[in-house]
Amino acid sequence: MATFYQGNVPTTAQTADAAGPEIRTIQLSDLHDALKLGWEDFKAVPSHAIILCVIYPVLGLVLARVVMGYSVLPLLFPLAAGFALIGPFAALGLYELSSRRERGEDASAWDAMEVLRSPSFGAMLGLGTLLLALFVTWVATAQAIYVAAFGYEGVTGISDFMTRVLTTQQGWWLIVVGCGTGFLFALAALCISAVSFPLMLDRHAGAFEAMVTSLRVVARNPVPMAAWGLIVAVLLALGTIPAFLGLAVVIPLLGHATWHLYRKVIVSAPDARPVPPPPHRPRKPAADFPANLFPWRNRTDA
């Protein structure tokens, strides 16, 4: 039997760290609180959030135009639904903004880019790549399901497509199988990324530890997390209805809310220390340009 001496006895904190972050049991009301706090963050920095997320409505418009122009209309719904798979990675900058507001610091668009300097950014990029692969696989699977139902014959327009899907036996089969398969992809994404990115940003955890923690969160809170997944799906669907422009509001709202959900479900580390604010950057008047690009030339010897 091992003998413990002073100095090698594991402390409670060390044991907790080895087992992973401590997880709380949350209620459905906590989801409402997270959304409310996320909305407050969005109202506090709306321009920054829109700047961060404007690429997604633009991408949606481009995708919609491509779909209409090249008669691949059946891919429009899978592409729109796929936002739920890559959304957690797309919201990295929003987590940073919420974190800074939580610490009482000023938040700006440039502050959101500080996430690129995180020690765990490589792990975030790795998990983001995994989610992107999941997204590509989902789109390919959705295309295969459509081909299995209707073959390779293209559609002549929206009315033709809707008639096929809603009034034929193959269409009903497509709806059932497609939605069921999409649910499995969404469930996989939720399980591995529910709190993964906020955890990596907050505690610099590795990708594997973050995914395991997300799985533990879902297992500990199956009903609230299932409800959260449903909320995400419904809001993203509503955001895509007005030509994808609603995503400029939905994505930042969900991104900020995810950070606050992480705070509610993960117990703060007992030895956590506040992150010091970034050093003050002196203002550089435009009149000093281009001399202010070379500050060392303005230094005087002491």
Image (cartoon, rainbow, N blue to C red):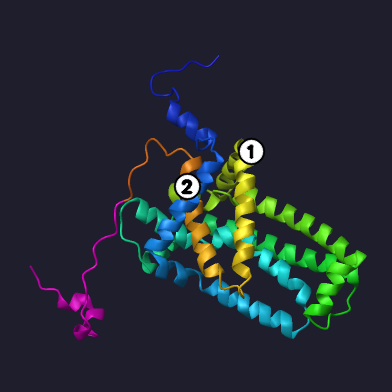
Q: Nearer the viewer, mark 1 or mark 2?
A: 2
Q: Is residue 10 left or right of residue 251?
A: left
Circle 2: residue type: Asp
Q: Is residue 260 left or right of residue 81?
A: left
Residue 189 is situated, as x and y percent measured from the top left of the image, at 65, 53
Mark 1, Cα crowd under 10 Å, few <14 / some 14-19 / many 20+, is few
Q: Which residue is mark 1?
A: 219
In this view, the residue in front, 133 or 247, is: 247
Can residue 78 be found in the magenta stretch? Answer: no
Q: Which residue is mark 2?
A: 33
* Magenta residue span: 276-302
Q: Quadrant of residue 80?
A: bottom right
Q: Is residue 73 left or right of residue 279?
A: right
Circle 1: residue type: Ala
Residue 221 is situated, as x and y percent measured from the top left of the image, at 60, 38
Q: CA distance from mark 1 to mark 2?
A: 21 Å
Residue 232 is situated, as x and y percent measured from the top left of the image, at 60, 56
Residue 9 is situated, as x and y percent measured from the top left of the image, at 44, 22
Q: Residue at x 45, y 72 (%)?
A: 51
Q: Please tell me whether residue 247 is drawn above or below residue 13 in the rendered image.
A: below
Name the quarter where the N terminus is drawn: top right
Q: Please tell me whether residue 255 is drawn above or below residue 15 in the rendered image.
A: below
Magenta stretch secondary structure, dominant:
loop
- Disc 1 + disc 2, Cβ < 8 Å: no
